[in-house]
Amino acid sequence: MEDNKDKKSRKKTTIETKEKKPSFWSCILNGIINENPTLVLMIGMCPTLAVTTSVSNAIGMGLSTTVVLISSNAIISLIRNITPDRVRIPIYIVIVASFVTLVEFVIKAYFPVLNEALGIYIPLIVVNCIILGRAEAFAGKNNVILSIGDGIGMGLGFTFGIMIISAIREFIGSGAILGHSIVKEDFRAALFVLPPGAFLVLSFLTAIQNKLKLPSASNKKEGCNGDCLNCDIHKNDKVIKEEE
Amino acid sequence: MGIKSIIKDTLTLVIITVVLVLLLSAAKVITEPAINKAYNETKLKSYNEVCNGYAEGEDITGDVVGASAGYRASLIGDDSVKRCKNASGEIIGYIVECTSNGYGGALNLIVGFDKKGNISGVRYLNMPKETPGLGMKTTEKSFLDSFIGHNLNDLSEVDTISGATISSDAFKEAVSLASMFASRAVTMDGGL
Amino acid sequence: MELLVTIISASLISNVVLSRFLGICPFLGVSNSVSTAKGMGVAVIFVILISTAVTFGINNMFLEASGIFGLDLTYLQTIVFILVIAGLVQFLEMFLKKCIPSLYKSLGIYLPLITTNCAVLGVALTVSQDSTFSKFVTAMAYAFGTSAGFCIAIILLASIREKIENNDIPESFKGKPIVLVVACLMAIAFTGFSNLNIG
């Protein structure tokens, strides 16, 4: 039963995307603007809040995630025809985890300072909802070129999103832009680089989006209810209904 | 679903996993030298920060190690106490690497001493996972530098950070253990 | 005594959600009502305790250089742990469904959501990488403290959300923004715990 339903919904999305005839560039733009994972879909919130104390950390995290996203999307799309449906999730997880470990090696070897700053959040890229979400929603159904485009778009969208948040936090909290202090110590609000500041900045960003009627998960649907594996935004109605 | 398809699914998963693990192991072998090099360079840099002019260290852990009962801190490894020499081979001080439990996990410190056993600098071996915020004050330079010039006897005069009792207590515990080893090393070398 | 310190510091002082930002997705997503929050919280405690025990064993037996392979395989931690957690959650779901249906009824729907809860993998990785938790008992105390911290935070948030549901909230703050403001205030309140003197 469940499997059938799943297959149906999968088929439906494929048809939908076929109608829109996505191209490589439209996939990239879609990730950066229409379905920006941080600002519109509001997924992958853990790193969004945790590493945005400075812009340099955010860029490091954003680019590492982008690399993992592009490579895992590419591989998952390549093997999508030989992936048995029932074990596809474990296979996705193994592929993503391998790339994360690979990226971890590279960061440790060539960017030790970044490794120090991001710490445990590097291996935790594995459970970033964006990556498994895109594998399930996009890369498992589309060809390699489009999947790479989607990876680039989503990755850059994520990077831009957390760069904006970190720029605000860094400027108000430590009075600096890209590490150069420009505001006197007396005029800094340290709260913004502390944990509460992360919630506050994100809250006001979403409120502004609501005010301007820009699309965001907050005024459309209630995000993905913590269900990262099924974080395909089109599936949301189904998930919510099931819980009720 | 037949037994056959289950076996096929499992096999696919296992094969993919094995291939990826082999690739990862290859990547590990390739990047390992670079990782070690980066690690050593960072370490050398911190050594120089806590013990100005550090060129080489001689392991003297075995000579000074002894009763450290009563301390909640401990040395990091078997080669954690070093006699430091500058480029021309003169003894310039000592370095002790020790660890203590803060509340978010271990605080791993490198403590440098001059020839007389006074602290010449304190650095983190790796950044602690303390709460960002008050606990993180123990990573600020002003706190680290407040230990400079003190030794085993007057360490209690250094102020702890109000609002971060556990972290700064753990920190002081580690520093005082380091000072204890350093003062032994000084006595051994006939300094003072 | 030391175990108590570990538990209190992991649950209150450096709360997993409010100061370490792990498990934000379910924290914001499944906190609409106290009853679902309770279910999620308990399920997380359950899974974190079991998964930490299992990954701790695997790490010491196979991955560390002192294990039976005699090789340092710690670089495989991420890939092994996430697979173990995913498998474990699946297994738990089946086991509960068959053997303890009453428990399955209350926790079942939350289990699949937990695989990608980064708090679970976060605890497993922290425990195996930090020398503080090299003993099994301290590791389990840390796991319990962390998951209890998650449980406390999500239940508190859900209670507050239920209370403010009918309040007069500015139009643009309705939905996610007000929840984030609440989380912000909770995080401020929790920083107060860092002054606890429990050494």
Image: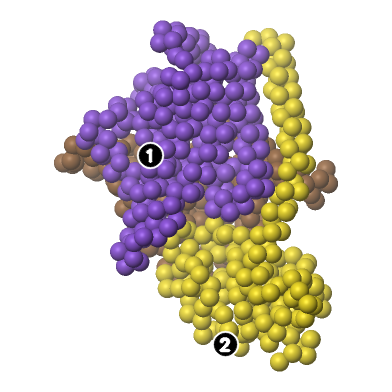
Chain colours: A purple, B yellow, C brown
Q: Mark 2 falls on what kind of element?
A: helix
Mark 1 — residue? Answer: C28
Q: Mark 1: give few (<14), some (14-19) or many (20+) Cα within 10 Å.
A: many
Q: Quadrant of residue B81?
A: bottom right
Name the residue: 66% across, 70% down: B48
Q: Is residue C152 above or below residue A215?
A: below
Name the residue: 24% across, 43% down: C163
Q: Mark 2: give few (<14), some (14-19) or many (20+) Cα within 10 Å.
A: few
Q: Is residue C136 above or below residue C195?
A: above
Q: Is residue B109 visible?
A: no
Q: Is residue C175 left or right of residue C126?
A: left
Which amino acid does the dot numbered 2 rest on?
A: Asp
Q: Quadrant of residue B104?
A: bottom right
Question: Label 2 marks which chain's residue?
Answer: B
Instruction: Report the residue that reaches farthest toward the left.
Output: C168
Residue B162: x and y in percent read 42, 73
Name the residue: 29% across, 47% down: C181
The disc placed on residue B154 is 2
Badge 1 and badge 2 in a common chain: no
Q: Is residue C185 above or below residue A67?
A: below
Name the residue: 39% across, 53% down: A177
Q: Mark 1 falls on what kind of element?
A: helix
Q: Is residue B45 left or right of residue C104?
A: right
C113 or A30, which lies in front?
Answer: A30
Which quadrant is home to the C terminus of chain B? bottom right
Residue B35: x and y in percent read 71, 49
Residue C7: x and y in percent read 52, 57
Residue C50: x and y in percent read 60, 42
A148 or B64, which lies in front?
Answer: A148
Which quadrant is home to the N terminus of chain B? top right
Which amino acid does the dot numbered 1 rest on?
A: Leu
